[in-house]
Image (tube, rainbow, N blue to C red):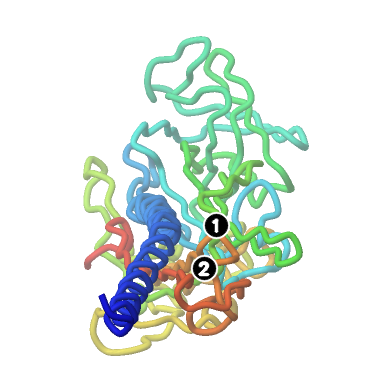
Amino acid sequence: MSLAEMLVASAILLAVTAAVGTVAMRAQTTFRVQPEVADMQQRGRVAVAALGHDLMMAGAGLSSTALAGPLVLHLPPIAPYRRGQSDDGARAGVFYRSDALSLLYVPATHAEADILHTIDTGRDLIVDPAPNCGAVVHERVCGFTVGMRVFLLDPSGAYDLATVTDVAADRLRVQYAAALAASYDGNAVIAEAAAPTYFLKADPATGAFQLMRYDGYRTDRPVVDNVVAFRVEYFGDPRPPVPLPPLVAAGDPVRPLTTYGPPAPALAVDDARDTWGAGENCVFINGPAPRLPAMAAGPSPIRLDPALLRDGPWCPDAGHAVRFDADLLRIRRVRVVVRVQVAVAAMRGPAGRLFGLGGTSTSAEFFAPDQQLVLDVAPRNLGVTP
């Protein structure tokens, strides 16, 4: 073999070796990156599944009490702030956060009862439920058990979240966190409640970026880690609330009296539980006239400006500790945007379009860009068709 032939053979061998090495390096990079990408996608699916389940249930209401029907007839099932017994946003004057979503619904167990009488001890409320609400035994009254999360609802729209601490004979004792929004002494109801709040916990100093779920009582638990963005948008009914025909006979089944929101009292009746005039409340004025304006023609939900959700009119009225903006009763559809990042900083490049939080990678081959998921949900328990 001549020297020239040896040089040519060596060059070919080197070229083939370099090509194989490049392929091997890229395969190794792919092998390292793809599991992290799969983990990121799985975390996104977990977040969307948790949010989707609670959103679909939002607004599920009572079935066998005087206030039967979807919760939107009395209070907002969806609120853009933290709601519960700990750090309640409304009590602190916080009525909108773009990174918080509170939901409220009655679970399928349907532990519920009309309230005959209450005694407020200053921290606990002793509740006498109406009879015939189910089997009454020493550990269960009307389906309520110790530790159960409940809400108390007044016909005016005032409500409080509480926890059952004792069941004795035919009486309940529930614990609340702050001053009650109403006395709930007659004409009110008590029911089991699911009241989760989802919010973003972002702490750049410690690197803790988590989607959290608050249970409405005391506990905040992480749903998924490395969530760098959580944003909620709201779409609502552009039409104002409309009164529905009243009950004709005493034996008629209970049905809604408005398309949404609490019905106004009779024209000559002044409800002493609020500061509105006779025949008025937070959604109606002068009897059947809506207080809320029409925002557009047609029933299709329109995007609600965040400013609209925190400027009133307030329900039950502006003086209530747990007041809410009446426009929250319009909400019919929710859009949630969740953005998750890869957990390994060495697979994130500079902060920008690909990465919400920059990393240490300088090679595009090691990039694992953030994944963004958009969830649009129209809960089935919102609104009543006239």
Dot 1 alpha-carbon crowd within 10 angstroms: few under 14, some 14 to 19, many 20 or more:
many
The residue labelled by disc 1 is 211
Q: Up-down: is 283 above or below 71? A: below
Rendering coords of residue 330 (x, y %): 40, 72
The residue located at (54%, 39%) in the rendering is 186
Dot 2 alpha-carbon crowd within 10 angstroms: few under 14, some 14 to 19, many 20 or more:
many
Q: CA distance from mark 1 to mark 2?
A: 8 Å
Q: Is residue 245 visible?
A: yes
Q: Toward which corner of the image does residue 28 lie, by quadrant?
A: bottom left
Proximity of marks 1 and 2: CB atoms separated by less than 8 Å:
yes
Q: Is residue 333 visible?
A: no
Q: Is residue 168 left or right of residue 23?
A: right
- Secondary structure under the numbered disc 1 in the rendered image: strand
The residue located at (36%, 78%) in the rendering is 240
Q: Is residue 176 left or right of residue 351?
A: right
Q: Up-down: is 160 above or below 6? A: above
Q: Up-down: is 283 above or below 109? A: below
Q: Is residue 375 left or right of residue 325?
A: left
- The three-letter code of the residue at mark 2 reads Phe
* Image mark count: 2
Task: Report the quarter where the C terminus lies.
Answer: bottom left
- The three-letter code of the residue at mark 1 reads Leu
Q: Which mark is residue 320?
A: none
The residue located at (37%, 55%) in the rendering is 45
The residue located at (67%, 56%) in the rendering is 88
Q: Residue furthest bottom?
A: 296
Rendering coords of residue 272 (x, y %): 61, 58
Of 98 and 135, which appears nearest the observer?
A: 98
Task: Report the quarter where the N terminus lies.
Answer: bottom left
- Secondary structure under the numbered disc 2 in the rendered image: strand
Of 20 and 220, which appears nearest the observer?
A: 20
The residue labelled by disc 2 is 230
